[in-house]
Amino acid sequence: MKIAKVYINQTNFSMDRPFDYLIDREMESLIAVGQRVMVPFGYGNKPLDGVVVDIIDFNAGESNGYKLKKVLGVVENYPVMSCEQLKACEWLQSNYHAFFMDNVNAYFPGTLNIKTKKDSDLKTRFYLDFKIKETIQYSLACEYRDLSLDQVLELTPKNAIKQAEILKYLYTGPKTREELKEVIINPNQAIKSLLTKGILLEAANKESYVHPKKLIKKPDLTPDQKNILSEFSNSVDRVSLLHGVTGSGKTEIYLNMMEEALEQGGTCLYLVPEISLTPQTINRITERFDQKAAVIHSRISDKDKVRQYLEIDKKEIKIIIGARSAVFSPFRDLGLIIIDEEHENTYKSQNRPRYDTIPLACKLAEFFNAKVVLGSATPSMVSYYKASIGAYRLLELPNRINCMEMPRTEIVDMREEIKDGNRSFLSKALYSRIKDRLDKGEQTILFLNKRGYYSFVFCRSCGYVIKCKKCDVAMTYHGKTNKMICHYCNHTRSVEDTCPECKSNKIKYSGSGTERVQALLEKYFPAARVLRMDTDTMKKKDSVQKTLELFADKKADILLGTQMVTKGFDFENVTLVGVLLADLTLNFPDYRSSERTFQLLTQVAGRAGRGTKRGEVVIQTYDPGNYVINHAKCHDYKGFYDKEISFRKTHEYPPFSRLFYVGFAGDDMKSVKKDCESYHRQIKVELEKRNQNILIKDVYPPSPSGIIRINNRYRYYILIKTSRIKEFNDIIRAVNFSDETKKIKSTMIVDVNPNAVF
Ligand SMILES: Nc1ncnc2c1ncn2[C@@H]1O[C@H](COP(=O)(O)OP(=O)(O)OP(=O)(O)O)[C@@H](O)[C@H]1O
Ligand SMILES: [Zn+2]
Ligand SMILES: [Zn+2]
């Protein structure tokens, strides 16, 4: 007899381990690792579904006399998880304390989700669905797409009128059979003969697949790019870090690496920080390769997600572009993973499962014997450190394409401006530079990391700041709605003329956000066309794309926005970048605020002067001596890195340690605090059990969060900062399974190296 080790489809700490079930002899041939089965659970033997992760021999002597329950049956008659996928789930469970079943479910898009579809045969059902609903689409074959219409019409004999009609119609873009039928009567015969002649392509209509209208020829590589590529091809290192200054031609290198991997038959995964902010990059990839590419993002329909899933599964798509969740694609022959702008914090998941994409990608590459390329102009401290100790191969591009100079940067001390009587958000220097660009017809990008009109409202009489009634944060005034909004829970309240505390009417609005800056810019420069890009203006589906297109087409002079404008855009006419207040990110209470600020400043500065004209950057700050700002000014990554890494080393922050964050939240402050303290005590107990008492110094005492209440939920946390990763992984797991933890009523999360700790 055999025993199946089964993870039951439940996500809580006590169920987060495999349970043993006997496999009846007659079922043995039906059950394999990776398959879903139904098993009885608990006193009532309720049938639940789960995934088999291992099958071992049953040894009657070892069973200790207790009677094992039996597997009831299979859900599908084939495994739904591959060995690599199961291994990845286990790895995430032990390294990120992510529930095994959360990891499994991350592999299944939308309606395929195991959580939602319990007793149906997933793949068979969706193959059927897929067949019925699929529409056929026709387009001109690639080689004819560059021709003029009269040349296209010459492809068929003059008397073939229907064929000519079809060609005319398809010249405007791909059409479905139904669309053709609306315009041309009985087109089937004509379609058929165009297909046989190879003039038409027939494909299933998949809106989420990008099939380019025109293929772009690749440019000749520069000597620097060639060197990097040959170093990469000849190296056997699993992971490479491509550190190239902004505008050094990294994307071109990725494309060449992909070409090579595709030639060798490998699937390529190209990860970007956020799909909607990277339309230029996505176009560059899809325009280069004459094959289907799946673009995976949260806005495509469930149906399309399932289609993509099945096609990747069947190895019909070899190029996958996506944000972090695309790392959970069901590839079978992975060859290369590119992680573009690898320093971006969107690569760390903030929801369950709380994984970090980079280590997970490296792990997958190990399973598939594939390569990983991390690329950035401002690599994360962790990645650059790993490259410096030889764990990654370091590839460096220190110069911009065609010897374009880096932009000239000026730091403006805003205290001096105030002394000189200038209380505006624009320094004299930045004002005159903007004016100059407007006169010359060149474009400007302005960055301010604060949205809204006024960032807080207070009483000048008693000092009361108007706070959200559900959160301990100041509310932001938004002019468009004439309301105050909480940026944490979206609670709104109307504006008041008198102070809620002392009833005085000395209400003062303060702190400018992007909304106000836009209004002021329009006042200072009435002729300027200003585009604003922040979460308030970018709510609609295509608004980012549209804004970027307008700006690229020079239909606007100034692009103003929050972090969104710092991303990897490539606009040749932008010659000025202004940072309105560098201090905002610098003063954020987190050990990574210097790293973040350096990255933001360098990245946004890198948008200037990418065409033929040299760029200029103006950084406004109240702290002009700050080393972060000064290294950014000199484009001195290495100088910043050296300083920052020694700070990390002295204070034992990552990469010299790992942070385990255990957070508790609930409606009642006292019980949240109590739960947090109980967890802390159990860590101590576990340390004692293992005679590791000395490690208690790595465990910080229970502490209220920086903002203790958000959306009426109180928050406490425990932070563990340690280099003893293995020990604490085990300890946290043991504590999570303990009886005391079962009594915890607060919502509890474990987050490894979270994006922010406070
Ligand atoms: N070999 C080449 N020949 C001509 N132009 C090139 C070449 N390689 C890249 N370019 C062009 O140079 C510009 C900058 O390249 P690219 O966008 O790849 O840089 P990057 O390093 O990815 O920039 P960033 O990190 O700032 O986003 C682009 O307009 C690109 O088309
Ligand atoms: Zn007051
Ligand atoms: Zn709130």
Image: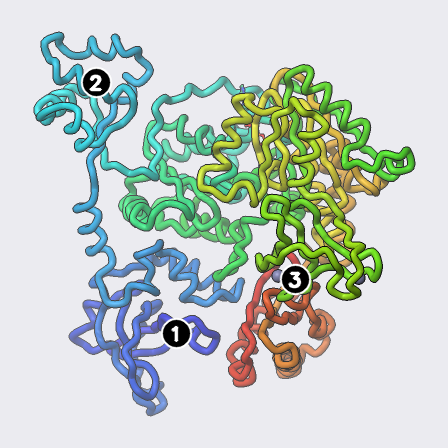
Residue 240, visible in the rendered structure: no
**Amino acid at dot 3:** Cys
Left or right: residue 186 versus residue 392 is left
Amino acid carrying label 1: it is: Pro
498 vs 358, left or right, is right
Q: Residue furthest bottom?
A: 65
Per the rendering, the mark at residue 18 is 1
- Expressed as whole percent of the image width and height from the top left, the position of residue 345 reads 59, 49
Q: Locate residue 442, reporting x and y percent.
A: 64, 19
Whether residue 223 is situated above or below residue 492 in the rendered picture: above
Horizontal arrangement in the rendering, residue 117 relative to residue 385 (left or right): left
User: Which amino acid is tagged 2?
Assistant: Leu
Q: Is residue 364 above or below residue 624?
A: below
> Which of disc 3 and disc 2 is earlier in sequence?
2
Name the foreground residue: 158 vs 66: 158
Q: Which residue is mark 3?
A: 468
Q: Are marks 2 and 1 in contact (CB under 8 Å)?
A: no
Assign a secondary structure to mark 2: helix
Residue for point 41% across, 30% down: 259
CA separation in Å, label 2 and label 1: 59 Å
- Check mark 3 vs ligand 3: CB closer than 8 Å? yes or no: yes
Q: CA distance from mark 2 to mark 3?
A: 61 Å
Q: Quadrant of ligand 3?
A: bottom right
Secondary element at image label 3:
loop
Question: Outermost residue toward the right?
Answer: 419
| Left/right of residue 552 with respect to residue 49 in the rendered view | right
Residue under label 2, please give it.
Answer: 167
**For the point 33% across and 59% down, which residue is it?**
113
Residue depicted at x 42% and y 45%: 297
Instruction: State the CA–CA distance, disc 3 to disc 1.
Output: 45 Å
Image point (22%, 69%), residue name: 74
Which of the 4 image quadrants contains residue 66? bottom left
